[in-house]
């Protein structure tokens, strides 16, 4: 990811190595699924759904929910459609451009909006606008849950996050029995923005994002997990939830 533009080569690398590149990926997905709460037969949007791992978790945990995976990558969309084909019309995949506003006017108010490892591609003002638009589109009582890279505050925190991320990838790869192949790929692909800064990654401090959510009008703004420069956090749109 040295060019500042996400490529299909990046998609292929992520599909293959995501479980090694993302600290406690399964735990993050578990927390997202838990914190959207009961959604009944409501619709859940997954922004930048990638190969469909999070969508699959949501479909399995919420047995009536309908999940829409939105992504810009043709390879990611194809992978998710194939992997989740058993869910039939409970899963649909749509091509979209995250910074664009055209997808944000929905025919149906979603019961929840989630995103994993995507929103950091937006700068601060773009994030705040996205959060504003998500608040507008959500059904009353709807949840917005984000797992993403965050910008550490200060040099010591930055170095701690860089080191923890690097060590997690190395140790997880070795424990898997794959040797150092995933760890080598992590560095060859310059995956850690903390070690290999680029124009594509624009994480914001966690405290700023929590403040934006609260200012916009979300309630129950909180952090559910944080490690190695990553965090899971979210909030609720005020109102009575109707679970479908």
Image (spheres, rainbow, N blue to C red):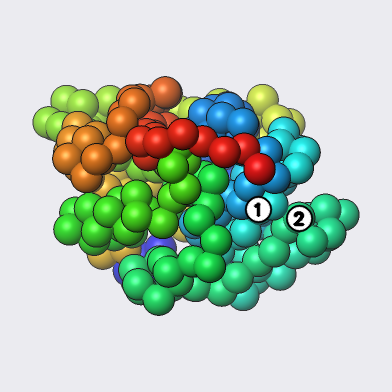
- Residue 67 badge: 1
Q: Earlier in the sequence, mark 1 or mark 2?
A: 1
Q: Quadrant of the C terminus?
A: top right
- At horizontal 29% and vertical 43% (from top left) the residue drawn is 194
Of all residues shown, which one is farthest toward the right?
A: 86
> Residue, x 77% and y 38% (percent of image)?
63
| Above/below status of 47 relative to 172 | below
Tell me: residue 157, above or below residue 60: above
Query: Residue 182 occupies which quadrant of the picture?
Result: top right
For residue 91, what is the image quadrant?
A: bottom right
Q: Do the residues under discs 1 and 2 have CB atoms within 8 angstroms?
A: yes
- 98 vs 110, left or right, is left
Q: Residue at x 70, y 45 (%)?
A: 41
User: Residue 242's x, y, as percent?
Assistant: 57, 38
Of the pair 68 and 83, the residue shown nearer to us: 68
Q: Relative to 41, is 238 above or below?
A: above
Image position of 221 with respect to 194: above or below: above
The number of discs equals 2
Front residue of 31 and 78: 31
Percent position of residue 133, x then y: 32, 58
The answer, for residue 198, to whether it is visible in the render is no
- Would you name the residue on which mark 2 appears? 90
């Amino acid at each position: 990811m040295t060019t500042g533009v996400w490529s299909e080569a990046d998609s292929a690398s992520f599909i293959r190595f995501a479980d090694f590149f993302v600290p406690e990926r399964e735990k993050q997905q578990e927390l997202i699924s838990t914190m959207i709460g009961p959604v009944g037969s409501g619709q859940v949007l997954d922004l930048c759904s990638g190969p469909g791992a999070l969508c699959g978790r949501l479909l399995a945990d919420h047995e009536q929910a309908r999940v829409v995976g939105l992504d810009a990558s043709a390879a990611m969309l194809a992978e998710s459609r194939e992997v989740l084909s058993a869910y039939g019309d409970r899963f649909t995949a749509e091509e979209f451009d995250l910074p664009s506003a055209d997808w944000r006017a929905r025919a149906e108010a979603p019961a929840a909006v989630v995103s994993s490892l995507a929103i950091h591609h937006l700068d601060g003002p773009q994030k705040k606008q996205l959060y504003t638009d998500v608040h507008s589109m959500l059904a009353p009582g709807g949840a917005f849950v984000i797992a993403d890279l965050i910008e550490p505050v200060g040099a010591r925190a930055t170095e701690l996050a860089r080191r923890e991320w690097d060590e997690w990838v190395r140790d997880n790869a070795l424990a898997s029995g794959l040797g150092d192949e995933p760890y080598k790929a992590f560095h060859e692909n310059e995956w850690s923005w903390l070690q290999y800064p680029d124009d594509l990654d624009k994480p914001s401090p966690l405290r700023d994002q929590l403040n934006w959510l609260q200012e916009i009008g979300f309630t129950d703004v909180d952090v559910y997990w944080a490690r190695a420069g990553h965090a899971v956090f979210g909030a609720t749109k005020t109102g009575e939830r109707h679970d479908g």
